[in-house]
Image (cartoon, rainbow, N blue to C red):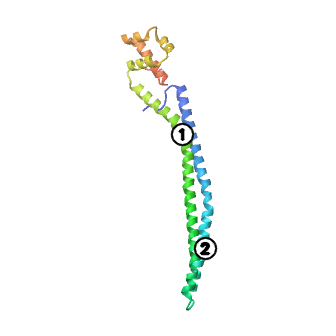
Amino acid sequence: MRLYAERPARLTGQVLADVLAIAWAVVWILLGVAAHDLLLRLQGPGFTLVRAGESIRDAFDGAARGAGDVPLIGDRLAGAFGPGSDAGRTLVEAGQQQISVVGTVATGAGILIVVLGLLPVLAVWLPLRIRFARAATAARGASGEVLALRALAHRPVRQLNRVGTDPAAAWRTGDPEVVGALADLELKALGLRGISGR
């Protein structure tokens, strides 16, 4: 498969377009990663909630264990610390949920930024490059007669008139000079060297 033109002007344009497309993609990927990292900072309060909840839960659990050792009323006293321990667990769950939601939003936002940034590259640059590669590969595998016919069908009349006064008639009769000139014209339009190597 031929990915690049052979003629310097077209080749330079293709290489420049490829470099710009890659640079554009890298910039948007970096922006997506930066947005992801920035949004992840919002997980801080969630981590604080988790730590606070764990502290409250552990304090009430410890108090309940200590109260459980009190003779006669230990079980009842330990049970009184249960709501405080549950409140700590609730805080831990709320913090973990916030951490999870912020992580999901950060990942989604990062991906969305990258996808939106890459849309122009995927919608414009990539189809053009694929179309060129297919056309150039097909042209390199085609005979001079087929290329000449394509030139007759696709090249402007002013270009065809430079080949001869009636290039279609010359093509029909198989005039090798006109067929070669038409084939070269088609190859040149694709940025490829002609059959003669020029």
> In this picture, is 167 found above or below 113?
above
User: Given the current orientation, which residue lies at the most extreme left position?
Assistant: 173
Residue 29 rendering spot, x and y as whole percentages: 56, 46
Nearest the eye: 23 or 65: 65
Residue 64 sits in which quadrant? Answer: bottom right
User: Given the current orientation, which residue lies at the most extreme top position?
Assistant: 165
Residue 193 rendering spot, x and y as whole percentages: 47, 23
Marking on residue 119: 1
Q: What residue type is labelled 1?
A: Leu
Q: What residue type is labelled 2?
A: Ser
* 20 lies left or right of 3: right
**CB within 8 Å, label 2 to label 1:** no
Which quadrant is home to the N terminus? Answer: top left
Number of residues whose C-alpha sits closer than 10 Å to that of mark 2, classed few (under 14), some (14–19) or many (20 or more): some
Residue 174 rendering spot, x and y as whole percentages: 37, 12
Mark 2, residue position: 55
> In this picture, is 150 found above or below 63?
above
